Every structure is written in C-alpha cells, then in structure tokens.
Image (tube, rainbow, N blue to C red):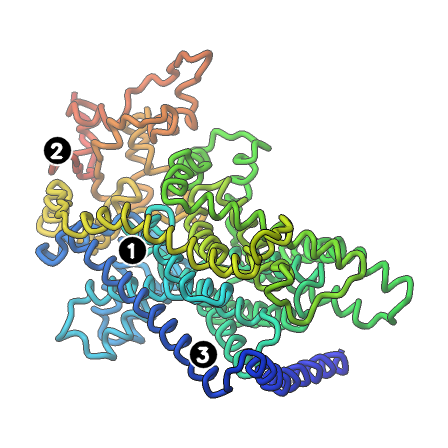
Amino acid sequence: MSSGAADLRQRKKQNCTESDKMAPEERNKENSKLGRSPKYLLIQRFAKLFFGCLAAVTSGMMYAVYLSTYHERKFWFSSRQELEREITFQGDSAIYYSFYKELLKAPSFERGVYELTHNNKTISLKTINAVQQMTLYPELIASVLYQASGSEEVIEPVYFYIGIVFGLQGIYVTALFVTSWVMSGTWLAGMLTVAWFIINRTDTTRIDYSIPSRENWALPYFACQVAALTGYLKKNLNCSAEKFCYLLVNASTYTFMMMWEYSHYLLFVQAVSLFLLDSFALAQTEKVHEVYRIYLFSVIVGYLLQFENSALLVSPLLSLVVALMLSKSLQMNMKKSTFVSRLLKIMYIYLVLTVAVTLNFLLKMFIPHKENGHLLKFIEVKLGLNTTKNFTMNWLLCQESLQAPSQDFFLRLTQSSLLPFYILVLIICLFSVTQVIFRRICGEPLKEAVKLEDGRIGERPEIVYHVIHTILLGCLAMCLEGMKYLWTPYVCMLAAFGVCSPELWMTLFKWLRLKAVHPILLALILSMAVPTIIGFSLWKEFFPRIMTELTELQEFYDPDTVELMTWIKRQAPVAAVFAGSPQLMGVIKLCTGWMVSSLPLYNDDDLLKRNENIYQIYSKRSAEDIYKILTSYKANFLVIEDSICNEVGPVRGCRVKDLLDIANGHVVCEEGDNYAYSKYGRFCHEIKMNYSPYVNYFTRVYWNRSYFVYRINTVISFQS
C-alpha cells in the first residue's frame, strides 16, 4: 500500500509539472495561430478574471443587502423593542438564538461554554450538552467574534448575529456564481444563476422565516466546497490552482460538517456521485480518492471535536468511504490482465455496496450510538412499508417540508423559465454522458483535451459530477419538499451554465448534424444571445416585484405573545417551569429565560416522548391524567394555545388534536364517520369551564385572546 500511494503521489506531481510545462507551449501555438502576443492574452485573461471576480463579489454583497433590507421592511426590526424582535424567532430558531444570548451574558467565554455543555437550566429534570445536541458551533463563533471585535459599543447583539447569517448567504450566492462561471467559462452564467436564485427565493432558501436554522449557517460552506470541487475535477488544471482547490475543499468540508448535524447525509449523496463518476472512469481516480480522504479526515476530526459524536462513526458516509478505499486497494494490488482483476473491475460497484452495507451493520452492532431511530421508522412509513398510530411519526408525516412537493412549486419554477431550461440542459448533458460511458465500455479512451468543435460536453468530469449530483438531489426533492432548498440552487446553477456554454450548444448541433450555418459560430452566438434574452425578460417581469417587496412596509406584530412574555417576566417566580407546545416553549425560553418542560427538538428520543406527553393537554384525557403528566416533569405553569385547541387545519387528520385522538384510540374513522371512544371531553376546552375536577388541579392566573395560563396546584383541594 505504501509503495502504491507513493506511486500515486509521484504520478500526480508529474502530471502537475507536465501540465505546467505544456500549457505555455500550447498557449503560444494558439496565440501564433490567432496572431496575438502572449502579453495581449495575459492582459485579456486578467481583465476577464478581475471583472468576473468583481461581479461575483458584488452579487453576493447586493444579495446580503437585499436580505437585510427585506428583513427590516417585513418586521420593522429597527423600530421594535428587544422583546418584539426576539418574538420574530420562532420554534427551534428561538432556541439557537437564546443560547447565543446566554454566551454573551456569561462572565467569560470558557464559563459560557461550560454552562452550555452541562446545561440544566433549560429543560426541567434534564441536563444536556447543548453544544453537541444542538450543534451550537455557529453561536460559539458568533459570540467570540462579537466580543473579540469590540462590537458591544457599536452594534446590538441581534444585528450582529443576523448580519453574519446574511453575510453567509452572500457567500452562498457568490459560490454558486463561481461554480457556474468555472463550468461555462463565462461569468455571464454566474449573473444568470444569481438572478434565478433571487427570483425563486421562496424555493431556494428559507432565510425569510428561519434565520438561525443550521442549514442557513451550513449551506454556504457546502456551496464553497462544491465550487472548489468543480475546479478540482477539471482536466489540465495547473498545479497552483489544483492545490488551491484542494485546500478549499478540505477546509469547507470540515467546516460544513461542524455546522450542521445532518451534513454527513448530504456529503454521502456527494460521495455517491463521485463513486459513480469514478466507476465509469470519467475522472482522475487519484483526485476522487483525495476527496475520499478529505471525507475520512473530516469525519474523524468532527467525531473528536463534537464530543465523540458516535452518529458520525455509524454514518453511511464513513462506511461508504472505507468500503471504496478497501475495494480500490484490492484492485490496485491485483496483477493486471488476470481473470480476478477483470472480475473485480466488473463487480466493483457490487463489491463497494456490499462492503459498505456490511461495515455499517457491524459498526452499529459494536459502537453505542444514539442515531435517530425514528428517522428509519419515518422512511418506512413514508414509503408505505409500514403503518403507525404513533403521534410523533404521524405529526412528522403531516409537516409540509416532509411531504411531496406541490404543483405550485413546479409552476413557480416554470413561470421564471428555470425549469424548462434546466430540463433541456439536463437532457443534453445526460445523453452526452451516456454516449461517453458507452464509448468507455467499448474501450475507447477519453480525450485529454476536449475542444469546442468536438461537441463532447459529457467528457468533462466536473459536468458529469454535477449531472449525477443534481439527479440524486432531485430524486430526494421529489419525495420531500424540504429537500428543494438543497436542490433548487443547483438547478439555477446548472441551467445557467448550460444556456451560457458554447460546448453544450455545440453538442446539440453535433447530434442535429447542422450544416446550413457554421455550428461553432452559431454556438458562440447562442451562448451569448439566449442568456441575454432570458436576463432581459426576467428583469422586465420580476424586477418590479422585487422592488415592491423592498419598498412595501409589512406589519408583523403579535401583541398577545408580547403580553404573555411580559406577564411571565413580571409575575412568574424565577424558579418556575412552564409547560405547553414545544414551539411556544422555545419562544418563552428565549424571551424570558425561564425553564421549560420541552423544546422543539427532534433528534432525541426522550425529548420526543416529552413533546408527545405534554401535547396531551389538547387530547381527550382526564384532568387527573394531565396533572400527573405535568407534575412528573416538575411543571408549575401550563400554557394553553387557543390556535391549537381550536385549530381548523386545511387537511383534516393532520391537526394536533386529530393525531392525538388517533394515537390514544379515542377516534376511529370508518367510511368517513368518526366514532368517539373517550368519556372525557377535550382537556383544553374543559379546563376553560372552571368546574370540578379541573379547578382542583389547575388555577387560571392569566389569559388573553390567544393564551390561557394556569398554575398547577401543589396542594389539591377537592371541592364540588
């Protein structure tokens, strides 16, 4: 193995030096043919690079400013009090920002980190490592930057926090710009990518209503990794550019893994794309295996720095990478032209998959882990392999992000002309890749340098990688609407690359055998004209809408929630524990700092069980049952939300109270008729009547139009 690795490194160094030596000679020959001096070509390339980078950076900055302006207009953020600003963070976003606040309030950074890793002031009767369980590295970095930069006297913490997130979104857009630029050779593709991304913002990002979510912190790093990987896979790349891309892939992969607990699943999809790319010998094997080593290094370092997170060790990414390395080493150590070597080459895909599945099974047997078991159950139910009455499972299935995408999604992409051009580009690239694979099976070698007149866009490894990657992400997006936020940005990038690439048009003309007009000239004209026409039509139709969004003042005000938080801060004891829906508990924790009995987290079995138990306040259970549940978690106050109790959902059967009735067996549906089997009324309704036995267990202490707060009596007085 050591000698084989040394040979690989030696060949790689030779390739770098050969490409560096050959490149000037080829350029000089080309210049002499065109009658241009090397100095003229150098100035031309520098100008193209300078203006392209300027356009990429400007696009990112303008998008960040656009997000900031839109956020200000939507929430009137600067004119709100601190409490009203914090209410705009809902659900899990509220929890992330609350820990950022706690870090800033700590006497020192070290003390703040210790309190987060040994946190017993958030959830009653439970001590958690919040940094590991909630992946709070973004908050750690933000708090360090805020304090180290001396921003306390310049900017408020909330503006600093959302400013970093908006800045990362600018980097996200810049990375997509660069990726399409590298693939097409023109930064016009980058401009079109950004335009499509912003116009389809509803389907490319959920930054509008979930700023602190992990994906908003993590996906910009993944976009940088994809951009660097695109450059790294290119043929005839000079040595310095290859090293730069390699280092950027390394840094961005590791950072991405530290920012999001589900990052290794997305990297697994990417690894499968590279595996298929390598299996058909469409890329340099040495480069692909360097990326595998980056995955391996990132998983190991992530495991150590994430408090020995065993979920990374049993992840499919690690199993696949180890299986790929083992299978490839077996092939390398076999003598060439032997029967066993040929057999291994034919059975390579089967061998890798078998080893990966076996290894993953063995790791899960011997390594104690807390991988989300409910995810596997969810997949079974989602695919129709199983049925369940479990409240949590059915509640997840009812979430919009976990359902199949609606027709409106495809309609929006079609109206912006994105989907038609994406399908066109994908079909052309896919057919070209299929032709290349067929030629490889027939024994025809790949060309070292693909020229424009060849019309073989499918021989470029970075193009093949993106075709495979976008198909895999697209399959996931067709099953789960929440995956569209991963797929749609790359749809924008691939479609923009295609319409701006002369190679793609030349590939199409090669199939059509166009002879009436010179195909190269026509390809160059179309690669400029088509994106220009698209850009002009997008500008005419969507630019007024975007400007209207920025100039139109929207009103977001929730006086009932503000009154509830104000009452808690003024009237509730400091040691009180509140119980209610997990989403509301996240807001209470952020706005008041009081301890809660549950949180909107879905990666811990104990918290999932807590959420289901406390949701029973909206079921048909007795006052005594609810009292026992709440006191088991040491809750002192109960908050009933009128919006959940009287919910009128668009899909019957997906309301919280319906799911609870099904799970508890209180309602059985037969031929459209509902049969109730509970002798108790719905708790959230009955408790408002103020009669026994409810008044014996609970005392109403506050209410408004949306919320009813009850003190849980410690001494029960049974009165008629």
Kind of residue sitting beneath label 2: Arg
Q: Residue at x 20, y 68 (%)?
A: 105
The circle on residue 45 is: 3
313 shown above or below 33: above
Check contact, mark 3 vs mark 2: CB within 8 A. Answer: no
Q: Residues within 10 Å of mark 2 (few under 14, many from 20)?
A: few
Q: Residue at x 65, y 54 (%)?
A: 433
Kind of residue sitting beneath label 3: Arg
Q: Earlier in the sequence, mark 3 or mark 2?
A: 3
Q: Residues within 10 Å of mark 3 (few under 14, many from 20)?
A: few
612 shown above or below 83: above
In x, y percent, where is residue 195? Answer: 34, 55
Query: Which is more foreground, mark 1 or mark 2?
Result: 1
Q: CA–CA distance between discs 3 and 2? A: 65 Å
Q: Secondary structure at mark 2?
A: loop
Along the viewing direction, whichever of 480 and 285 lies nearer the viewer: 285
Point out the residue furthest to the front here: 516
432 displayed left or right of 677: right
583 displayed left or right of 701: right
Residue with the mark numbered 2: 705
Check contact, mark 1 vs mark 3: CB within 8 A. Answer: no
Q: Earlier in the sequence, mark 1 or mark 3?
A: 3
Q: CA–CA distance between discs 1 and 3? A: 39 Å
Along the viewing direction, whichever of 544 and 663 lies nearer the viewer: 544
Q: Is residue 319 visible?
A: no
Query: Which is more foreground, mark 3 or mark 2?
Result: 3
Q: Is residue 503 visible?
A: yes
Looking at the rendering, which quadrant does residue 518 occupy? bottom right
Along the viewing direction, whichever of 485 and 656 lies nearer the viewer: 485
